[in-house]
Image (tube, helix red, strand yellow):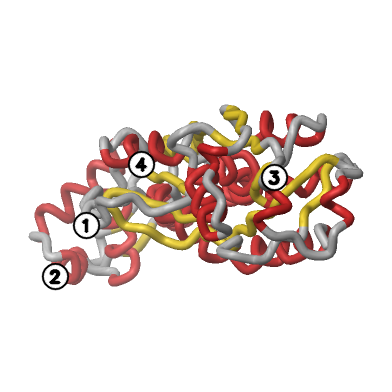
Amino acid sequence: MNTRSLRVFLEVARTGSFSAAARNLGLTQPAVSFQVRSLEKEYGNVLVDRSTGRCQLTEAGRVMLRYAQRILKAEEELSLEMEGKRAEPSGTLHMAASNIPGEYILPRIMAEFHKRYPLVEVRLAVADTEKVLERVRAGEVDLGCVGFKGDEEERLKYGLLCSDRLVFIAPQGHPLARRNRLNAADLLNQTLIIREEGSGTRSHMLRILSDLGLDPSGMDCMVLGSTTAVLEAVASGMGISVSSLWAVEPYLRLKRIETLNVKDRGLRREFYYVHLRRRPQTPATQAIADLIEEMRPELEGFLTSYANLSR
């Protein structure tokens, strides 16, 4: 929008002098005269009366003054509005998350994110932790959310998403659910339902079993490819498992699954968000990271209420 002539005209009207307007604007006097004459020619009216030696606005000039002030004020407001739009995150945010964060935690965050940043299109892929880390390393996604940290920490930058609590689960009414405290021997003859290779939950489950002195290779095991499949298998009476309290909560409320009172050995874990350390962060990536930090206390509150439900 070319408003140069209007600005020159306003300065002439304010100072009552072509020479003073030229000094204030850093222009030559002929340049100021040219801009005013251009407006007069464009609108077919004399705007400034020069006959008395002091520049005075004609009736048409006073009309031009009112509209010029409005136009320049609107231009300033437009510039501020556009500046705000440039600062507002927009575009596409590519994310990948492992099963539990992707299906049970991030949807809560994304709902709030969409309210605040409607110009950002979020695309979320759900895969196991190893595949998510692979996509982050390859630069295919802006941000990943995983259940454990990878080995290449020098290339990756992690932040805390929220906590999780892993619980031993069995179908409703299972005999072990009535026991006050279970030990390794109580689990030996049970069918274990575990996640596939690459799953963060599987890695934690195997470590927990090892801490209890159990070797899954010598037990009756069934491997399933998703958290939902594991939970449905347990609810159907196929065996016991270890799963995230985030995922188990609706099954507890519906009384399809019960938690087992196994000695707490490393049943707490953390989820992380992660991105390439040297990858430039877009406004959208920074906005989702800031929102995660802001919402973490709320997420921890949800987890505490779920833990009370499992008792």
CA distance for labels 2 and 4: 63 Å
Q: How far across and how far down the image is residue 283, in percent?
A: 38, 51
Residue at 62 percent across and 49 percent down: it is 105
Nearer to me, 310 or 289:
310
Q: Amino acid at mark 3?
A: Ala
Q: Amino acid at mark 2?
A: Arg
Which is more foreground, mark 2 or mark 1? Answer: 1
- Name the N-terminal-most of marks 2 and 1: 2
CA distance for labels 3 and 4: 22 Å
Q: Which residue is mark 2?
A: 23
Drawn side of residue 127 relative to residue 109, left or right: left
Drawn side of residue 150 relative to residue 238, left or right: left
Task: Bin the neighbour count of mark 1 within 10 Å (Cα to Cα): few under 14, some 14-19, many 20 and up.
Answer: few
- Name the N-terminal-most of marks 3 and 1: 1
Q: Which residue is mark 3?
A: 247
Query: Which label sits on residue 154?
Result: 1
Q: Secondary structure at mark 3?
A: helix
Q: Secondary structure at mark 2?
A: helix
- From this viewpoint, is residue 68 visible? no
Task: Bin the neighbour count of mark 2 within 10 Å (Cα to Cα): few under 14, some 14-19, many 20 and up.
Answer: few
CA distance for labels 3 and 1: 31 Å
Residues tagged 2 and 1 counted as in contact (Cβ below 8 A)? no
Drawn side of residue 245 relative to residue 96, left or right: right
CA distance for labels 1 and 4: 13 Å
